[in-house]
């Protein structure tokens, strides 16, 4: 768990939404999840999806764990991220030319965006997923609109002097910071909606058949299936072996190993060893205790 948190920028955010904390010591991902009552395959599914864009469901999804994650994300957006972003936006636009109406229009546009997210989340919390099924792009488009308004029309204060370093720090830096925050918020919310659409909705649909543990539709991921030999190579990669070592273990050429690795990356669209490790764990190709 420590390796995941230390090497992936968004991992701590994901972990917090599952109700987990830092201070994990040397415990494995499974140990931390079990300790906090979090279903490990569901945790790894969200991590794999958000960090590595791997969209195949594992053998099982626990709806309670997944919905708890989404509920914590709702709280994060409404009670922390969006209010802080509004304060940052006010700080960034305050130094603008006081004669211009553009800053207040930008803030109004942001408030409309927040209200749409609030309505979206209220519907989700009430289980009314179908009512906003096609709202995601329109809502995230609001943030893109705010960014474009700032980029194209943000007024220059004629009283500012570009040679004044203190003005540069107190005027330009907050604006740069809020643009970065807007971009990250847009991406975060888009990922949140994608998790709802591509993990939660299929899980809910399958749960209607009376299964609390949702089984994977193998036909849906047929195009991403690895061959038996590719799975053998993947297992050795996850264990940390070099291409030559894998070739020796499997009694094949190094060139063949490289070819298999290219096919694995192409089929799974996972390029990092960490991502391949999570895929192997989720799909029960390796045991956590063996790593």
Image (tube, rainbow, N blue to C red):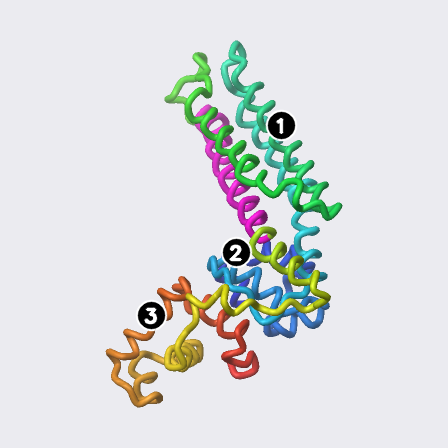
The residue beneath circle 3 is 263
| Quadrant in the picture for residue 5 | bottom right
Is 176 part of what is drawn in magenta?
A: yes
The boundaries of the magenta stretch are 167-195
Question: Tag 2's secondary structure?
Answer: helix
Determine crowd level at label 1: few under 14, some 14-19, many 20+ residues with C-alpha closer than 10 A: few
Which residue corresponds to mark 1?
112
Q: Which residue is pictured at 47% across the width and 24% down the height?
A: 149
- Alpha carbon of mark 1 to alpha carbon of mark 3: how far? 46 Å
In the image, residue 122 above or below residue 32: above
Residue 147, relative to residue 74: is it above or below? above
SS at mark 1? helix
Q: Residues within 10 Å of mark 3 (few under 14, many from 20)?
A: some
How far across and how far down the image is residue 234, in percent?
41, 77
Q: Nearer the viewer, residue 92 or 217?
A: 217
| Depth check, front residue: 140 or 275 | 140
The mark closer to the camera, 1 or 3, is: 3
Camera-nearest label, 2 or 3: 3
Residue 98 can be seen, yes or no: yes
Residue matched to label 2: 50
Which residue is painted at 48% across and 66% down in the image? 221
Residue 185 in the image, given as x and y percentages of width and height: 55, 41
């Amino acid at each position: 768990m420590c390796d995941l948190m230390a090497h992936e920028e968004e991992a701590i955010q994901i972990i917090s939404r599952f109700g987990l904390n830092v201070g994990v010591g040397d415990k494995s991902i499974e140990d931390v999840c079990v300790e906090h009552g979090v279903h490990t395959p569901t945790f790894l599914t969200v991590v794999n999806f958000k960090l590595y864009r791997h969209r195949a469901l594992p053998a099982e999804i626990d709806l309670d764990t997944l919905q708890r994650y989404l509920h914590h994300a709702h709280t994060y957006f409404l009670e922390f991220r969006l209010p802080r972003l509004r304060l940052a936006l006010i700080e960034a636009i305050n130094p603008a030319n006081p004669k211009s109406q553009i800053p207040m229009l930008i803030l109004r546009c942001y408030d409309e965006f927040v209200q749409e997210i609030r309505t979206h989340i209220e519907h989700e919390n009430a289980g009314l997923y179908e009512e906003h099924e096609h709202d995601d792009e329109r809502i995230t488009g609001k943030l893109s609109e705010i960014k474009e308004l700032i980029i194209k029309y943000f007024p220059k204060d004629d009283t500012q002097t570009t040679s004044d370093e203190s003005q540069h720090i107190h005027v330009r830096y907050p604006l740069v910071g809020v643009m970065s925050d807007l971009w990250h918020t847009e991406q975060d919310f888009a990922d949140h909606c994608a998790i709802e659409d591509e993990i939660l909705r299929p899980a809910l649909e399958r749960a209607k058949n009376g299964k609390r543990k949702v089984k994977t539709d193998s036909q849906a991921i047929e195009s991403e299936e690895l061959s038996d030999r590719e799975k053998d190579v993947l297992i050795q990669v996850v264990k940390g072996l070099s291409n030559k070592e894998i070739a020796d273990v499997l009694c094949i050429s190094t060139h063949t190993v490289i070819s298999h690795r290219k096919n694995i990356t192409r089929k799974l669209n996972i390029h990092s060893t960490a991502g391949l490790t999570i895929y192997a764990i989720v799909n029960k190709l390796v045991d956590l205790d063996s790593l």
